[in-house]
Amino acid sequence: MRSRIKQSSTLGDRLKKEARNLRKQAEGMPPSIRRDELLRKAGQAETAAQMDEWLAPSGPRTSE
């Protein structure tokens, strides 16, 4: 049986934070493959956060 971890923030919030961190890392880098990878991953995290918002139920959430 897998242990479960109670998250203190929503998936969307964690994805947005990850995107900000990735963009911050890429900010000071010269143009390179690594910088492009960081920016691509940041974009993917932002898209995933938007999808999470679209798919979330509009009513109040209940904990399971």
Image (cartoon, rainbow, N blue to C red):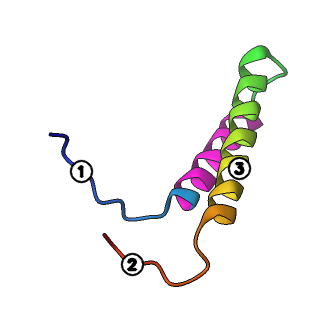
Q: Is residue 47 above or below residue 55?
A: above
Residue drawn where x is 75% and y is 27% of the image: 29
User: 30 or 47, which lies in front?
Assistant: 47
Q: Is residue 10 above or below residue 40?
A: below
Could you say whether the residue bearing mark 1 is in a helix, strand or loop? loop
Quarter occupied by the C terminus: bottom left
Could you say whether the residue bearing mark 3 is in a helix, strand or loop? helix
Q: Is residue 39 above or below residue 8?
A: above
Q: Is residue 64 above or below residue 3?
A: below
User: 33 or 24, which lies in front?
Assistant: 33
Query: Marks 1 and 3: which is nearer the front?
Result: 1
The reply to whether dot 2 and dot 3 touch (C-beta < 8 Å) is no
Q: Position of residue 54 (x, y in %)?
A: 69, 64
Q: What range of the chain is rendered magenta? A: 13-27
User: Main SS type for the magenta part?
Assistant: helix
| CA neighbours of label 2 inside 10 A, class few (<14), some (14 to 19), many (20+) | few
Label 2 to label 3: alpha-carbon separation: 25 Å
Residue type for callout 1: Arg
Residue drawn where x is 72% and y is 24% of the image: 37
Name the residue beneath numbered marker 1: 4
Residue drawn where x is 81% and y is 23% of the image: 30
Q: In the rendered image, is residue 28 in sight?
A: no
Name the residue beneath numbered marker 2: 62
Label 2 to label 1: alpha-carbon separation: 17 Å
**Rendering quarter of residue 50:** bottom right
* Residue 21 belongs to the span the image colors magenta: yes
Could you say whether the residue bearing mark 2 is in a helix, strand or loop? loop
Label 1 to label 3: alpha-carbon separation: 25 Å
Residue 46, label in figure: 3
* Residue 25 belongs to the span the image colors magenta: yes
Q: Position of residue 34 (x, y in %)?
A: 71, 19
